[in-house]
Amino acid sequence: MKKSIFSILSAMVMTVNSVAQNPVISSIYTPDPAPYVHGDRVYLFVDHDEDDATYFLMKDWLVFSTEDMVNWQYLGAQVNTATFKWAKQGDRAWAAQAVEHNGKWYWYLCCNTNDGKDALCVAVADSPTGPWRDAIGGPLATGFGFIDPTVFIDDDGKPYLFWGNKGFWYGELNDDMISFKDGYKEVPGYTDPKSFGALQSKMDWSIGKKREMTQYEEGPWVTKRNGIYYAVYPAGGVPEYMAYSTAPSIHGPWTFKGRIMNEAENSFTIHGGNIHFKGKDYMFYHNGALPNGSGFKRSTAIEEFKFNADGTIPFIPFTKEGVKPVGNLNPYKTVEAETMSQSWGVKLDRLAGVRHYVTSIHNGDWTMVRSVDFGTDAPKEIMAEVLNVKNHGIMEFYADALSGKPFARIKVDGSNTLLSLPIDKAPTGIHDVYILFRGGDEQLFDFDWWKLGRGEKMEIVADIDFGKVKTGLKNLASIKKEGEKKVLNLGKANGFYDMTQEMGRTIQSLSDYTFSVKYKVASANKLNGYGHFVFACSALAENSAQEGPYIAFRLNEQRFEVSTGGYCNEQFIMQGKAPERDVWHHAVYRQKGHKGELYIDGKLIGTNSNMPFPIDIFKEEPANCWIGRAPFKGDKYLTNTRVSDFRIYNYAISDDEMKELNR
């Protein structure tokens, strides 16, 4: 009875807050939001207040992203204090900000050294989903109040770092992004009321007593618009409000412009910054408005605003409604379960990497995504994947409200984690979608992804007829006739076929898929050492062993591999030996959900249930695609080998189709 009442109360909570968007993430606490616009996506870098915090208890940093400003996909706990071996472990993972520069991502964070000093640190990665590593091997700078870094790259390409609590410092970074060009210094005007607001008595912990200080408190955010430099920051001591100053140069002089946000709800701190995205301006901040929230359990919120005609920032009131969607969600592509606009009860995993899921699911919990475009033709089927089934349960899918009849109902009994069933009657047009979980009193299962379908026939998205290939043959690669068909001959030295980034864009869009290729290796090829790739699709034109992401099939071990970033982050299936020479072989890789299967000559070689989707690992990065070329610097190209029947399907073929393909 207790659980039934809880379910009803959950539905009531949802109904009351059906139009509320703030806070924007309700499955985990997300203080100190740092948004970054990259192409048609906003990445959100945040800290993480622990659920049981009674003071600032913060162990890791999280990443989210969105294309529509309302549905936020969790991309993982990508960095934690263990990333920095020299730092105090398990706490003090405070405010941070990330930026992309020259193809690398740099995340500026703050933590404590083992001997208790405030420290700035830098993590680096090839993408927001990592893997992230310590870029320096020690702190970038240490000093009392050295927290809350913000990074800014000017129009001339010069990068700057600003930071500080009860002090305000900055310095120009070298192009390596991990060292200062000429050291750092106090921001000009920091002690001047004309620059950063009226003096007031504040506690200065560096000297152990109060003194007169300007309004600036901590957490700066530096941007530029129409030739004007803006510094937005928490101000006024405790509790903090949001204020800003402007300057004609990155070096000042700064002029105090006043309050733009009041003290945050149920939080004595406020922290954030502004971005321009899809023609609109947004201010990010945090509050303590979630259930059980407080000044030590804070959550990201967002407000839209418009600059005044003179370039000043208006006062921005807090709202529960938050922002409106600037795009629609496509349910006919894989929707990660951890993509949500609102939720109740559920939690997120605390993992790095690219595969993530919703966990801690109990009876009465729910998630919601906004502005889902069903189109004019209603879906006919629904697919989903669950993990770690602990107890049987049901997932119910509702349009617009947790009331009435669900348009889809999926039973989870543990017999199969990949679920698919027809839909009798589903909506058309644009709707919010709620997913309600039902079951017994204990934890049910974890939820990975869902997707709608219209029963359309799946397709071969790549089927190369080598008899028609006129361009893309590199070095000694050529087309040869073998029997009744023409095949690709890779030659004796560094020959390969460049399938161009057009093929890469096709592969980038895949979730479930099937890869098929035939190959014959001449006895002259010993296949010794690393390399010998039949096929490779890589985000980079040439990788080091630590870089990626990529998808590849190589012959020295007949190994199909998918990496989120470098050799050490591969998921793979392999036979473990080279193919027999001078005879044709056939490899088929099939992936449904995150389960991959590799077949060699019709025989199942192995499976792996943790294979990432291509659509997840490549993101918006252009992919390079080759037959015969190694994606790694120094690896051997595939030589003395012929290739034919290269195909990629945009779905996991059936067992019957597999038998037909392997004939």
Image: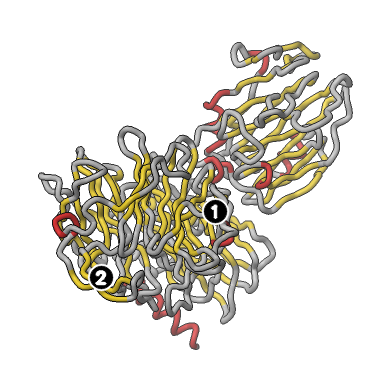
- Coordinates of residue 435 in the picture (x, y in percent): 46, 64
Residue farthest toward the bottom in the current orientation of the protein: 1
Number of the label disc, if any, that sits on residue 237: 2
Residue farthest toward the front in the current orientation of the protein: 207
**Residue type at tag 1:** Gly
- Coordinates of residue 272 in the picture (x, y in percent): 32, 58
Q: Front-most of 242 and 162?
A: 162
**Helix, strand or loop for disc 2:** loop
Q: Residue at x 39, y 80 (%)?
A: 9
Q: Residue at x 78, y 15 (%)?
A: 492
Q: Residue at x 65, y 15 (%)?
A: 474
Of callouts 1 and 2, the N-terminal one: 1
Relative to residue 282, is residue 577 drawn left or right? right
Which quadrant of the structure image shows residue 344? Answer: bottom left
**Residue type at tag 2:** Gly
For disc 1, the neighbor class at 10 Å (few under 14, some 14 to 19, many from 20) is: some
- Coordinates of residue 537 in the picture (x, y in percent): 61, 32
For disc 2, the neighbor class at 10 Å (few under 14, some 14 to 19, many from 20) is: many
- Coordinates of residue 327 in the picture (x, y in percent): 34, 47
Q: Front-most of 513 and 262?
A: 262
Number of the label disc, if any, that sits on residue 483: none
Where the C terminus falls, by quadrant? top right
**Helix, strand or loop for disc 1:** loop
Residue located beneath label 1 in the image: 138
Q: Residue at x 24, y 71 (%)?
A: 211
Picture layout, residue 278 above or below residue 12: above
